Amino acid sequence: MGPLPPFQVTVDTKGWLCVLDVRLALARHGPMLALRLAEELRVCLVPRLWSILDNTTHYRLHPQDLLADPFADARTPMPDPASLDQWERARLDLSLPVLRLYWAGERIDESFMPKEVDSQVIQRFERFGLDLEQRLLGTAPDLEPALPLLGGALDATALAAAMSRYRPLILTLAEPSDEAPALCRLLAACGVDCRKVDSEQSRPLRRQLTPLLARSGALELCWTGLDLAVVHLVAPRAFLSEALDTPDPDLESDLESSCGEGDRLDDVWQDASAFWYRLP
């Protein structure tokens, strides 16, 4: 009998799934950050980024349309026009799959998602996004969800909810002060409870994430002033909807009768909350 083959253990070093907020993707060094993080994380881009890249000529002529964000701090860095050129090159010349980036499109066949993500994720993403937009318009009817940065934050949140069984992170741009990120202020306006996690409570997660920043080369980008914030979304009804894509009508009727006044069974954001902290 010949020698046994060497024993090998394969370790999955890319267990974290990360949704990149448009505000961070378009920041100075944002494209470089995404490409470097993709070496260690499964980085997923949102459809709003493609809408922006399909209209780069307009945004170069009218940059104010790209910069508008009613929830951003006045001192928060604005999108860098150079990032548009870098993302266009990444998408057209270099090929995103080669760069190990994932993205959500309008349909599942226009998307490139991690292999474990189920085929219904885009359908859930669209439904959750519309519900979140309606919540925003219900509290702030004068806001325009089509604003690129505002829509990008809605996209990132809805996509994270649609993939909740895979425990995704949302990575966004932190404010220069210790205030909540613009994405969290938006969620608060939508009725989603947002809380900062103190350094003691977030230490176990930061101990896992900071080495990934160091290994990927993203940590030095933080030294240049690229402030990062991590948002964890907890949406129990979104998680449940994944298991009950086609609920039993009798069960749904019983659940509706047990709901309190003003509750909606199909409102996945009813009991949702978000928690954030800064990195590194």
Image (cartoon, helix red, strand yellow):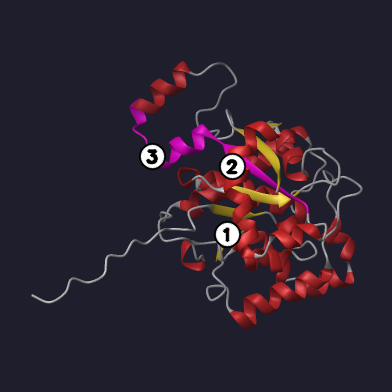
Residue 192 visible in rendering: no
Vertical side of 159 occupied by 239: above or below: above
Marks 1 and 3 sit apart, C-alpha to C-alpha, by 22 Å
Tell me which residue sits at (16%, 74%) in the image. 3
Q: Which residue is mark 2?
A: 205
Assign a secondary structure to mark 3.
Answer: helix
Mark seen at residue 44:
1
- In the image, the segment drawn in magenta is 227-250
Where residue 219 sits: x, y (%)?
70, 59
Tell me which residue sits at (66%, 32%) in the image. 200
What amino acid type is highlighted by mark number 2?
Leu
219 horizontally vs 143: left or right: left
Vertical side of 180 occupied by 105: above or below: below
Badges 2 and 3: C-beta atoms under 8 Å apart?
no
Marks 2 and 3 sit apart, C-alpha to C-alpha, by 27 Å
Q: Which residue is mark 3?
A: 243
Where residue 222 sits: x, y (%)?
76, 57
Q: Relative to the observer, which residue lies in front, 233 or 71?
A: 233
Where residue 275 sits: x, y (%)?
65, 35
Q: Relative to the observer, which residue lies in front, 130 or 274?
A: 274
Magenta-colored stretch includes residue 248: yes
Q: Relative to the observer, which residue lies in front, 215 or 181?
A: 215
Q: Which is more foreground, mark 2 or mark 1?
A: 2
Residue 217's image quarter?
A: bottom right
Tell me which residue sits at (80%, 44%) in the image. 143
Counting other residues with Cα less than 10 Å from the Cα at mark 3, is it few (<14), some (14-19), or many (20 or more)? few
